[in-house]
Image (cartoon, rainbow, N blue to C red):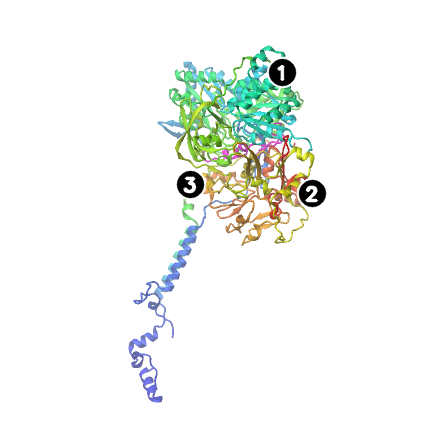
Amino acid sequence: MKLKTDKIKRRSFFKYLAAGTAVMYMIGRNSVEIIKSKFAKSKSVEVKENPLAVKRNYQKDG
Amino acid sequence: MDKGADKEKNLKSDGQTYWRSFSELYNNKAFRDALNSEFSSEELNGLRKNSKSSLSRRRFLALLGASAAFAAAGCSNYRGKGQIVPYNKKPEEVTLGIPNYYASTCTGCSSSCGILVKTREGRPVKVDGNPDHPVNKGKICAKGQASIVNLYNPERLKEPMVNEGGRFIQSDWNNVNSKIKEALSSANSSGKQVALISHSVTSPTFKKIIEDFQKAYPVAKLYTYEVFNESARRSAWEKTYGRKSLPVLKLDEARVILSLESDFLGTDPNHIENTRLFTSGRDVMSGKEFNRLYVVEGAATLTGFNADYRIRLRTDAIEEFVLCLISELVVKRKISPFAGDSQVLSMLSGYKLDEFAAKHKLDQKVLNYLLEDLLKNQGSGAVIAGDMLPESTHIAVNFLNEVLGNSKLYSRESESTDVHPLSTSDEIETLISSLNSGNVDVVIHLDSNPVYHFSPDYSYRELLKKVKVVITLTEMINESAELSNFIIPLNDPLESWGDYKTRSGFYSLQQPVIAPLYNTRQKETVLLEWTGRNYSENLYHDYLKENWEKSVYPMLGTTASFDKFWFASLHDGVAFIQEKPEASGLSFSKDAFLKSVPMKASDGYVLLLQNNNTVGDGRFASNGWLQELPHPISKVTWDNYAAVSPQAASELSVNSDDLVEISVNGRKQVFPVFVQPGLADKVIEVSLGYGRTAAGVVGTGVGVDAGVLVSAKPAISDRLYNNISVSKVSGKYELASTQEHYPIDSDPLLKDIHKRRGIIREGTWLQYKEDPKFLEKERHKMDLSPINKPPVYAREDYKGYKWGMAIDMNKCTGCGECIMACSIENNIPVVGKDQVIANREMMWLRIDRYYSGTPEAPKASFQPMLCQQCDYAPCENVCPVAATTHSEDGLNGMTYNRCVGTRYCSNNCPYKVRRFNYFDFRDHFKDSYQYSESFDLMANPEVTIRARGVMEKCTFCVQRIMKEREDAIRENREVIGSNVTTACQDACPSDAIVFGNVNDQDSQVAKYREHELGYTVLEEIKVAPNVTYIARLRNIFEKE
């Protein structure tokens, strides 16, 4: 006997699947952090060496 | 299909038919519909009236799956960490993965030790001692090690601040500088004083800047102070010998040392050099007889507990003791020309050693040993007095040294110089009265904090309200900055240029190892701007270089160009010059001795305000690593306390964690009690530097401010008070002490259990001299109870190199510098006081301190305990996921990402050296303090940062071993064991820790392993540890 499926419900299923996937992707990517970082100021701490400092050739050299 | 016909057919053909219901029998519509809807959605999802649950199984599973997916997504710790990209334009000096080293100078205290800073990708990650520096020779104290944390402290000031209506607003340099220059000019023109208040000035170039400042503003006056200073010693020296510079003692040549309330191995300035020199006379490998240390003290100090003979004596009686000693030597035994001096004899009449000993219940036998030793070693003994003792005691000690001929131990090569003497108490009084009378218009705190440090007698906090403009130059907000009009943010010392002169014969240089992280400047640069110079990034560098070209370079008398000299000095961190000390021409004057008024002992309680090796005078209070470093004797972290002797505790009816109120000259303060074995009776010891009210998230409110008891005009000295009153008050305060954490053997019924189980093995020098193998023979006295079972797995013969360590307990003083070095090297988190109370401190290395003998006069034994890297490690075969395994070079390894946190390994470890991350400790402090961006920069990239739920322990600095392996592979050679040094080994000032390849018979560690004094802890359980301890020998006259 051929199974009659509800065509309307099959369409809803795919909609739900797509929507759910999108929501999980967004949460998984921590969207709030992404949006915050886009509006955040640039990195407050920048690391630079002082060009006038003289480094050692090796830790224990004389 | 005609069901009805079929049924009738069924009925007619065989007379029987099968039907289940009337519906089937009569084949009605309901029956036919049901046949067609076997898998009806209603059946599956719809509400079934008779069902217990309104939820179908399918829906339940669907919801369960969705919830799990949402929960997993929500619980993920994904934080946008950005992208890691290699350099687009790589700086010339930086090679990824290869560290750079820079020589510089530590400014943690006035000793100005040389440091070597290791940087990775342009940022400092470790501070060690500079091996070329003649004072500390490659070692640095815990404060120096931990100074790296101050650079990355997220609470550092980033911009200049202006106080507007009680609120601090960020401003810019031009605005702030113009207002300040205006205030300075106004003060200048009105003739009102500009007071510059600073800590001790040890930089010749900074001194010159002050002079330039005073030329620009003639009303400017410099006041300098230090909470812990050598003023009494220096003034006594000047009165006795007519010289300002102090001699450097050749402690390595001393055969006998008598220390009088001097913690020269622990907290006194220059303790790194002192430890090295002292322990060089206690080397089992040299075969030479040990030196002998006598300590007479009221406190319970590290030096005291390292003594061969320790005499407990209340501190205010020490001067009388010295005079009795002098009387014994000069009057009774007539060993000195002063025996014929009537003035000296008259001064000493009334001082009799045997009467003194009887009065203070001192052990006459020990005093006789002391006298004999001092007499036998005239010219090779040293008598040292502590900084807190008054000038009169130091004068008496100078006289004693002179009588014994000990001036031969004063170095002829180098002496301790003073670039700018500290202000006297009279000068500070003058400042206070000027402030009081409104004659000071501008006060500038040059990286100092007098609101916290000054005695409350001065009411300095109130006096500041009378000043028009208060300016504080500081790295972080502090008590003085809170009351200022302008706050000037300073560079960290690792971002600064500088030069220092603390000894004759050389200068130390300081160079920035990183450009300023924030919009900050050096205090020297700021002062130069205020004198009228235009700002440039290298303003102070150019000034410093110019000053060196004019004043330092000519002293060399060299033909090399100045630039060569300059680069060489920066490379080495130190510049040697031709300069002989004045000390070579000493002439002693007895007048000071005759005129001094001796300190008088009282019968009441004595209060000692002590230095400490963690927060110092309070300037390191915001450093969590230092706060969590256990006190070497009490093992208390995160607090100070009033240490009382067991006898005083019984008199006051107090126990540890009770509260007492101490009253000094009408000022009171309440402290938690800690019962300290070994303290002299009626002596109470409290550390200064705690109880700060503006020291950031970490330091604010930690401990109690003992500075409120400091007197501006003390009767004896500003750190020593007698005739105080002490009383118990209600309440409790829990102190976080680690001394009972991780006990190896906690059977309380057996006294001296640590000796009987072979945890601590000791002897005497006499025993060793008579029979070098005495330790082996002593083993039968111990409760070894050998376990007669074979090991779980066959012992491996380690071919190639095998790593091992040896710790010489004769050299280990228990100072704890190794713990700090390990913590910084291995990214060990700070857990906070509450977690320390819960036994969860994370330091991989601990120093166990065992007492033996009576609580009143115990001996102490110190033993560094770390992962023993056992060959038959009991932790390895209980891990269910093989997260801890054994390597082929003898290491017990930890694989953090396999660990699931069963803690079975820690349970099985007999040495209790494993540490579990119960929490993500980095998230423990307020406002995610340890997750701040700047702290990420501090982490050593060579060591994994462990997550929550993971076990960790000492790895023998496997990252350094791996580096040597990589170098060996690249250079196509064998791994050389001596090329690898662990962080703890690098930091130990006495070189007590030795590490290397035990299979190399020429290596030092192999020699220690085979030494007759070598033993392993808990050898009877047959886990075959790879850390060998060398038994401690006390150099006493009796055999134990």
Residue numbers of the magenta segment? B127-155
Amino acid carrying mark 1 in the image: Leu
- Write down the chain letter for disc 2: B
Q: Quadrant of residue B1014?
A: top right
Q: Residue furthest right?
A: B1002
Q: Is residue B908 left or right of residue B489?
A: right
Q: Please say whether residue B1014 is one of the residues in the magenta stretch.
A: no
Q: Which residue is mark 1?
A: B586
**Depth check: B176 or B573 in front?**
B573
- Kindly tell me whether residue B340 is visible in this rendering: yes
SS state under label 3: loop
- In the rendered image, residues at marks 1 and 3 fall on the same chain: no
Pick the quarter of the image with the N terminus of chain B.
Answer: bottom left
Residue A40: image tag: 3
Q: How far apart in space, not on screen, are marks 1 and 2 (Cα)?
A: 50 Å
**Is residue B182 visible from the viewing direction of this image?**
no
Residue kind at label 3, given as amino acid type: Ala
Q: The disc labelled 2 sits on which kind of residue?
A: Asp
Residue most extreme to the top: B342
Marks 1 and 3, how far apart at CA: 67 Å
User: Is B864 or B759 nearer to us in this picture?
Assistant: B759
Give the CA separation, mark 3 to mark 2. Answer: 57 Å
Q: Nearer the viewer, mark 1 or mark 3?
A: 1
